[in-house]
Image (cartoon, helix red, strand yellow):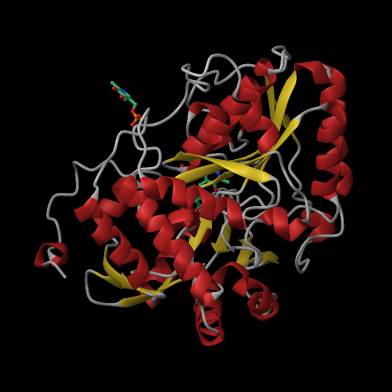
Amino acid sequence: MSNRLKVTPNDLSAFWMPFTANRQFKQAPRMFVSAKDMHYTTSDGRKVLDGTAGLWCVNAGHCRPKITEAIQHQAAELDYAPAFQMGHPIVFELANRLVDIAPKGMDHVFFTNSGSESVDTALKMAIAYHRARGEGARTRLIGRERGYHGVNFGGISVGGIVTNRKMFGTLLGGVDHMPHTHLPEKNAFSKGVPEHGAELANELERIVALHDASTIAAVIVEPVAGSTGVILPPKGYLQKLREICTKHGILLIFDEVITGFGRLGAPFAADYFGVTPDIMTTAKGVSNGVIPMGAVFVKKEIHDAFMTGPEHMIEFFHGYTYSGNPIACAAALGTLDTYKEEGLLTRGEELAPYWEDALHSLKGEPHVIDIRNIGLIGAIELAPIAGQPTKRAFSAFVKAFERGALIRTTGDIIALSPPLIITKGQINELIDHVREVLRAID
Ligand code: PXG
Ligand code: PLP
């Protein structure tokens, strides 16, 4: 451990922190200085149980040796190679390894550096695909209320989180939104996917009738909405969306940035729900969050539609300086090796019933108005303090951190998504922290 990391910085002002209450943080900073497996260590030497896999990304747990070694080796071997018009071996190896574990038919991978870039890449692919096939009028994009698709202009345009949209002007044109599927009056305290609400998929038919299918390029949804506070698809809902998209020639994009790489107990949500999209966006778990990386998976037909024209011509005018960066690829290969050796992409399946029972044991604790779960995701929704939305959950977050557990809150919802290596004992520990916190806060 480098000594430098142990020093607490004495000037916090220069760094404008992302998605953070900067002024509150800088008055009482919360700092991590190291991590191993299921735990972080704070700057004052306390161990904190990671109940959120960092930001839903450290699926294999922290500082795993295969990943660390792969990065160290690659940094000394080939640090960078131009991403455009040049290649290097492990980016091809990684693409093949990813296609091997992807849902059947998703045969090609385009690399990005984040979920936000994956989303904007997918949206551009969808529009360009239709154009390449001579259906250039298909430019509209359909998202969903409360959807989170990252923070770039495409992503916030199809996204449906008001706070992420309202400051940023008129966004992309030609976007419409389906309703979200959060129906607490019917589905509160459901275990796993809720019974009610599949008919909400028919709202897509209404939107198609309004604009005409010939103007619509793609529909993008999170199979399970994460960032907005864990909203599950009602039974049969995703199947219906798939049918409607297929019927109208509209591409279905699953944003699997959170659900990808084992979070639900299957490699992807597409596997879990038995519904295959046309394009799948991923990031986070692809490289265990260790080096920024994203990957967009596409069906063969979509990729092949671009492979026309003179062979010396670039087929898709899109890409990032760091697409398929060698060190990110090494991290991803080390991650896939770790997932494979430890069965992590399906481990959530056997742990899910235990996780579900533990979470739902919080029913009846103070402030709890709903509990939701799927795979190794959990949400505990709290009644807001009148006139002060988000305050109660934020106090829970700070208290949990002080007690030794990292939880995540959004609005007045506590979201839990531990690394997939969590033990049953650690599940109990995490839920006990949350129980004590709920009893302690106002
Ligand atoms: N799509 C989805 C479905 C996501 O969940 C993104 C895109 C954007 O990924 P990047 O890598 O650009 O952040 C995400 C990211 C939270 C939280 O606590 C969720 C995300 C990121 C940070 C925090 O809910 N999701
Ligand atoms: N801005 C400028 C001035 C650039 O030269 C580039 C890339 O060359 C970019 C933005 C895009 O950067 P990236 O490829 O890392 O997304």
Examine the image and state in which quarter residue 265 appears.
bottom right
Nearer to me, 176 or 127: 127
Left or right: 271, with 49 as reference point: right
The residue shown at (19%, 49%) is 12
Is residue 181 in view? yes
Examine the image and state in which quarter residue 380 appears.
bottom right
Total labels drawn: 0
Residue 418, percent across and down?
A: 51, 69
Left or right: 108, with 77 as reference point: right
Is residue 143 in view? no
Left or right: 338, with 218 as reference point: left
Examine the image and state in which quarter residue 274 appears.
bottom right
Outermost front residue: 311
Nearer to me, 133 or 176: 133
211 over 52 or under it: above or below? above
Residue 253, percent across and down?
A: 67, 38
Residue 18, percent across and down?
A: 36, 43
The residue shown at (42%, 59%) is 333
Q: Quadrant of the N terminus?
A: bottom left
273 over 179 or under it: above or below? below
The residue shown at (40%, 63%) is 334
Residue 109, percent across and down?
A: 54, 42
The residue shown at (52%, 55%) is 97
221 over 320 or under it: above or below? below
Outermost bottom residue: 425
